[in-house]
Image: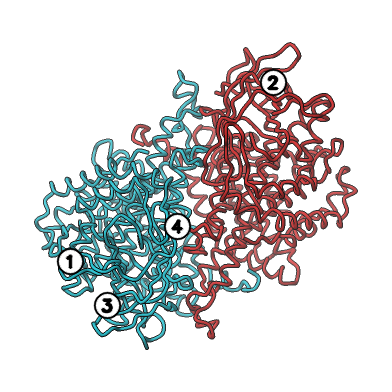
Chain colours: A red, B cyan
Amino acid sequence: MQYQPPERDAQFLLFEVFRVQDLWPEIEAFAEISEDLVRAVVAEGGRIAAEVVTPSNQPGDEQACTWDNGEVSTPDAYKLPFTEITGGGWLGLAGNVNYGGQGMPKMLACIVEEMLWAANTSLYLYGTLTVGSSLCIETHGTKQQKETYLPKMYAGQWTGAMALTESHAGTDLGIMRAKAEPQADGSYHISGTKVFITGGEHDLAENIIHLVLAKLPGAPDGTKGISLFIVPKFLPNEDGSLGERNSWSSGSIEHKMGIRGSATSVINYDQSTGFLLGEENRGLAAMFTMMNYERLSVGLQGLGSGELAYQQAASYAKDRLQGRSPTGAQNPHAAADSLLVHPDVRRMLLTQRAYNEAGRAFGLFVGMQLDLAKYNGDRSAQELAELLTPVAKAYLSDKGFEGAVMAQQVFGGHGYIREWGVEQIVRDTRISQIYEGTNGVQALDLVGRKVLRDGGATVRKLVDQMAQTRIAQVHQIEFNEALDRLVRVTASVVGRAKDEPNLPGAVSTDYLELMGLTLYAWLWARMAELAPQDEFGEAKKATSMFFYQRLLPKTHGLERSIAASAHALMDFPDDLF
Amino acid sequence: MQYQPPERDAQFLLFEVFRVQDLWPEIEAFAEISEDLVRAVVAEGGRIAAEVVTPSNQPGDEQACTWDNGEVSTPDAYKLPFTEITGGGWLGLAGNVNYGGQGMPKMLACIVEEMLWAANTSLYLYGTLTVGSSLCIETHGTKQQKETYLPKMYAGQWTGAMALTESHAGTDLGIMRAKAEPQADGSYHISGTKVFITGGEHDLAENIIHLVLAKLPGAPDGTKGISLFIVPKFLPNEDGSLGERNSWSSGSIEHKMGIRGSATSVINYDQSTGFLLGEENRGLAAMFTMMNYERLSVGLQGLGSGELAYQQAASYAKDRLQGRSPTGAQNPHAAADSLLVHPDVRRMLLTQRAYNEAGRAFGLFVGMQLDLAKYNGDRSAQELAELLTPVAKAYLSDKGFEGAVMAQQVFGGHGYIREWGVEQIVRDTRISQIYEGTNGVQALDLVGRKVLRDGGATVRKLVDQMAQTRIAQVHQIEFNEALDRLVRVTASVVGRAKDEPNLPGAVSTDYLELMGLTLYAWLWARMAELAPQDEFGEAKKATSMFFYQRLLPKTHGLERSIAASAHALMDFPDDLF
């Protein structure tokens, strides 16, 4: 399988759409980042993704991880690319410079992350969990904890894992049972069984740092009684070397639909030594600091898969000769025309392009808010990041999956057999809609928490911001209608939710899609306005026309569907399901 | 995994919605079929599906088929249920009574087929190919061919397979290369390599009857030069016993995303003995006789998967305790409420129900047209069957896949691991959107061939028929709007297609969905009208409200999207994909 890093598109977005050359000088930590450096990072990240990581993707799926008496082996093909990713410092790209990180903007990390996800989703999971855990330690750890863990984790010498879920407690963390008992030396003994631990045990790193949620004795019930602990595989000595092996073990690994090269463990903690991270009973809040970043990253996983799938489908459609154009033979000297003559094949390819390219822009827009919030303490940016994170996680992953399924459809029967690798993309990317909070949970977070908490004020600010940018005139009327629709629907939902407690959940998935389409309408109109006078720009403009004429109209149905009362869902008698 | 045959729903549709007790006496061949017999067939088919076939589903996926030097072994778990299916005469249910078939209506077969698909898609593929091949022989074979093959095939002693595709010729059969050379004894020598042959080689039957498309010497180019041949694995002796082994062999089997218990072979024909079926150069037409039936059956495959997936999701949602109702605890003595309190979970379950139950009704409606056309020579029914077959194949399989993906989402992480079996449903049902003509090909068949060939006249007849039935008053306004929309959009497409050759393909997928939703609106309004005054009826009415309020509104967006010119697709420069 081939993968072409979307380097040109990344540069267009960074320098022409979001103009980081104007933005970053306003952020002290980024003031020294030169345009050349950015281009070099994008190019080198792309090279590693395409040349070093991509070749491990299919072999890793074939071999999969194996478990033997608590030891987990990753696919042979993973060793070299993981060494290259970690050795190149890519896991510390946006890490804290005081502890060995490179201090680069999240916006830039978004580009690199997308490429690594695309190249090998299973392999990069070991990376992203390390990045996420590092961020949590950076934000909530003591100075000593940061000094002990961060340099090793940025270097990928040690990897991270998050142990939240228990078999009876998935989305509902409040009912978890894992226990933490304080010890005389200030450490804790952690006991319990956690499931679905991505990268919980494996052979790619010398140490694995678990962040574990557990309850202290006498802690309040529910989510207010959960604390967070660092529970390493090997307890670090004072000099940073590896000490005693901790008393947790991998009880088994899951056999999954996809991401078969990613080891998903059951972990049994048996009086395992842990260290409190952050404050007692504030573990969930600490975990959620990281969540905005992780959820965006899972969205980027979907985007990467969508891009990889598109590239396979477009390449196949160009090469495969089947049938004739409705307007007469286009390739008269061959037995058939290419798949590209068929309008419905083009519909699928353009749908993929339209969602991928707007999705890339959207991911960067959210990354920009995270940068402004983190480094400039920008409150509006923080609110916007909180509003848009569930949209990015759910919408990018939904469209990534749809795009992968469409690519399979372009391939026909060849998309269903393993040989071409397209069915693997479908299987691998499916998980992005489920983990890190299912997309239903994201939608409820968007409507029930983010939209309603300020009566839609942040949505209106976002709409104002979109309305004030210069966009391509050709889209102005439909764009204004789309903004009006979002404002109108938001006001309706906010108003009705007061009397109907079930309304937010009832409309949440449709509302999230309405918001996604409206954001993409903005980004497409903006990209069309800024598209250069060359082939790249021509493709952008044609795709924006396609988006406006064929995809945006879906908002008409969504508005009507959201207008329905929650009774449409709640009246069905429970026992008749 | 548990499966509950939808027996009550089947009886409601047969006796209350479509009133077969009034219809079948008008068809001579069915005049003797009693209500008791119908109920017994449905009950016994359901029992075999649920009790005998379902247990083989997951083990078959785990073990999969294996190939060894041309011999193909099916999963161990398949032997017993296949013997029960064939021994019970189920493959001959709708077969010709003169050759050992039971002569039952397609409508009744639809119910049984759905249940067998649901119980084990991979296993029933061996059956459906046999049913389809039998139908082709029944329609085009000589008396001797019918006598030789049909009794054995109805009994499942011999199974069938269709060899159409070559590696360079999938959808475009016109460019195939397989050759047939006439021999002095009236037989032919068939040579060439065919791929994707479902059930081409396996160990479930003593003989395998291939129907092979190939070209005679000097045949016209393209689809007008293709003939159809019977190419058995063992050549039958005059007394019906097995004779010489034919000279074809399985070169390999495919490793696929799903239906891993179904053997998909590459078959190498090397001067293999074949017998002409039907007329020279009319092979594609002969094959297409069967296609209406096969395509409906693939739609029923999607429906069966959708039903199986729904049942798993509903059962899980009732049992799994996570979170609390937005209106306060519903299950205060437990740690959490069931998933059913969450509106978005109900949205997914009701979406599945709404598509499954309307889909079941739709399948029967198409089956009814096939019965009327075949047994009463009803020309209108034949036209309606031709119009609706591509809709049934594509829409039922699309909704089956979506339903399986939704079920996975209800399960969360447990939907992604193999243990629960839900991810298998997703993998298995995905193929139904691809084979027997991709759903894009179905959509083009619908618009480019069926709608345009009579300028939309058959669509208008269908609309008149729908408008004349008595429906639930509560849906009258929206139903009328939906019919008007279909008429308006059809007229627009017919008009615009005259000047825009690419238009049919450009709008085909959206148009097919619009037609599917409109048909389902009719069937839901009709079912709501006829729903009995009991729990079953209450569930029907609640689901119809959900369909009208939450799913039908999608038609608003589809109308707008279909209004776009084909330029939205065709203007994008080919080399920029």
Write down the chain letter for disc 3: B
The answer to whether residue A173 is left or right of residue B335 is: right
The amino acid beneath tag 4 is Thr
From mark 4 to mark 2, how far is it between C-alphas? Answer: 58 Å
Neighbour class for label 2 at 10 Å: few (<14), some, many (≥20)? many
Q: Nearer the viewer, mark 4 or mark 2?
A: 2
From mark 4 to mark 3, how far is it between C-alphas? Answer: 47 Å
- The residue that label 4 is drawn on is B555
From mark 2 to mark 1, how far is it between C-alphas? Answer: 76 Å
The answer to whether residue B347 is left or right of residue A102 is: left
Disc 2 + disc 1, Cβ < 8 Å? no
Residue toward you, B15 or A80: A80
- The residue that label 2 is drawn on is A273
Neighbour class for label 4 at 10 Å: few (<14), some, many (≥20)? many
Quarter placement of the N terminus of chain A: bottom right
The amino acid beneath tag 3 is Leu
Whether labels 4 and 3 belong to a single chain: the reply is yes
From mark 1 to mark 3, how far is it between C-alphas? Answer: 18 Å
Quarter placement of the C terminus of chain A: top left
Q: Is residue B409 above or below residue B576?
A: above
Mark found first going from the N terminus, 1 or 4:
1
Q: Position of residue B303 (x, y in %)?
A: 36, 51
- The residue that label 3 is drawn on is B276
Q: Nearer the viewer, mark 1 or mark 3?
A: 1
- The residue that label 1 is drawn on is B240
